[in-house]
Amino acid sequence: MIVDPNACFTLEEAQDLVAEHAPNSYYTEHYRQMEDDYLPHLCALLDRHVPGRALEIGPGWGTMALWLASRGWDVTVVDSVDVGHFMTQELLDFSGVQYVRENIEEPSAGLLGLGTYSLVVMTQVIPHLRWRPTCAIRNCRALMADGGLFVTTALDCVCYPGLQPPHGTDWRSIPEWEEGIERPNFTEAMEMCMYSAATLKGLLGQAFGKVNVWRAEGSTCLFGVCRH
């Protein structure tokens, strides 16, 4: 690990470093403001836990990965895009984070060889999944060590009444992954489905027995926390 594990970056310090390494200005002009809606709550939650092996699915520009690495976590990230699309090689080299390109949505995703993790994080990813998200959730559970923690977030549909994704608020209507079938792609819709606290809890309950879902005060995002 290149980042000093005693550095303990604040969220703002991690964001500043990510901005320095971002491949374009989108992070500074747009994405960082969206992070401010939910990452302070996530950092407060994770700051209570003893560092171990952490896996982040869909790391975006790498803010949480860098923040976790600076606090002693051994961090691996998984994304379906090449290095440089969001996280740059320079940031990976600086942070010591391992990058794996895989699609968490597919049952055949080559992830089990990565071992297991005491923490699996997947923020702001579930609404964007093109296949029915049950497979992705089960893949996440399979990557968790005994007693491990899974944390996810999604926009609360109550806070975004203007968003009308192709599948509304019914994740069960999203097609299941099927080999040989082209991945659904709605070029005008970033979200496939929106979630309420009840529907997010119902989805997470497909893979986890212990599920807690809430919306943090001052945030427009739902938080879901599950135990292996």
Image: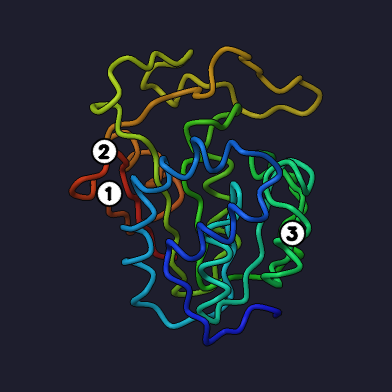
**Label annotation for residue 213:** 1
Q: Residue at x 58, y 41 (%)?
A: 135
Find residue 220 and report its image quarter: top left
Closest to the observer, 40 or 140? 40
Closest to the observer, 143 or 96? 96
Instruction: Identify residue type, mark 2.
Output: Ala
Number of marks drawn? 3
C-alpha gap between disc 2 and disc 3: 31 Å
Dot 3 falls on a residue whose secondary structure is: strand
Instruction: Identify residue type, mark 1.
Output: Val
C-alpha gap between disc 1 and disc 2: 6 Å
User: Reading the chain from its start, which is encountered first: label 2 or label 3?
Assistant: 3
Circle 1/circle 3 CB separation < 8 Å: no
Q: As drawn, is 17 to the left or to the right of 102? A: left
Q: Position of residue 159 (x, y in %)?
A: 25, 28
**Label annotation for residue 99:** 3
C-alpha gap between disc 1 and disc 3: 29 Å
Q: Is residue 113 above or below residue 49?
A: above
**Label annotation for residue 197:** 2
